[in-house]
Image: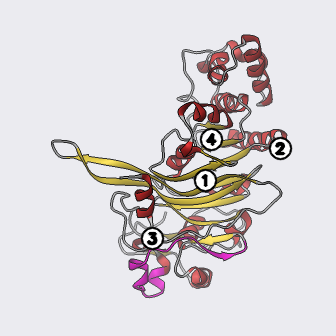
Amino acid sequence: MSAQAVTGAASTAVDEVPQPTGEGAPLLTVENLVKYFPVLGGVLRRKVADVKAVDGVSFTVRRGEVFGLVGESGCGKTTLGRSLLYLQRPTGGRVVLEGDDLSTLKPEQLRRMRGRMQLIFQDPYGSLNPRMPVLDIIGEGLLAQGVKDSRERTKRVEDSLEAVGLRRDYTRRYPHEFSGGQRQRIGIARALALRPDFIVCDEPVSALDVSIQSQILNLLLDLRRDFGFTYLFIAHNLSVVQYISDRVGVMYLGRMVELAPVEELYEHPRHPYTVALLSAVPEVDRARARRRIVLRGDVPSPVNPPSGCHFHPRCWLRERLGNPEICSTVDPRLAIVGPGHAAACHFADRTQQEQERVAAPVVAAGAAPSA
């Protein structure tokens, strides 16, 4: 099946993607991105189905912006980030980096383009080769991008270490000689050394102590200020995303279900899934605490997602509205619901009203009670 055919099969509707506001020009444009993984079965190991990891995602990121991406485990956040960098080639759709369509680039052109796009991994130890000193770990990317002079590579590695708060003479040490926070700084220095335009941060603080998380977040913000980096920041922790992001996209089962500026999303969520996620965030101020909404059941399989709205089997709003048929028959796509704000829900205009009417935690049949 061609990429065009898969892209068309992802959805019959088209997302209305709000354009980012601010001074920076658009750097990254993603159009109906699709990434399917084949499921093989039978004696001959033929394809019998597809895992729809990313199923028609569109958004734009402006230069200098931090775009946060949140959602439950298995919703496709990491796959989306890797597909943007073409570490996993998309099944369909387009990724355009400042006018360059990555799908049209030849292998050598794509290799050079990767110098402008970097990835910070989640595991600060597993992403570092334990048999290589820091000089070779960071310098490997420089060598791949054509920096042949060893003295220049050493200087750029040392400059990168200094920029992330490590000593220049750490180049001779090995990963096991560093703490978790220092290893993550080395991972950031590796991305920084190539002076990229766009960096995908794949849950860069989730494996660190809380005290170290704030240091790494502030470091990323300082580097953005000093070098003009643009981030796609993937995380589970909504408090972390709120702190570091300018805009936030919410993913569910391979789809973008809400997209808005960070203040607007946290104060006025318009998708029932976003409301449920925010209700689980601990709040120190009891007057501002949201009533907990416990979702029914587990996330459906991406091999066979539900018809209509993928979220409708677990949707608390649908239950409050009397289970309207449109939720299970018509697939909603992103639609503009406010300035810079889009949501993929048939009843986005009713979300806040119904949320305020919830007098107690909503625990649907079959759901485990909250602690």
Helix, strand or loop at label 3? It is: loop
Foreground label between 1 and 2: 2
Residue 195 at x, y = what percent? 74, 33
Q: Which residue is mark 3?
A: 12
Foreground label between 1 and 3: 3
Residue type, mark 2 in image = Arg
Is 9 left or right of 337, judged from the image as shown?
Answer: left
Is residue 324 shown in magenta? yes
Q: Which comes sooner in the sequence, label 4 or label 2? A: 4
- Judge the density around disc 2: few (<14), some (14-19), many (≥20) Cα neighbours within 10 Å: few
Foreground label between 3 and 4: 3
- Judge the density around disc 3: few (<14), some (14-19), many (≥20) Cα neighbours within 10 Å: few
Is residue 49 shown in magenta? no
Tell me the residue at 76%/50% (across/down). 63
Task: Inspect this view and state whether residue 235 appears.
Answer: no
Q: Which residue is mark 1?
A: 237
Q: Which comes sooner in the sequence, label 1 or label 3? A: 3
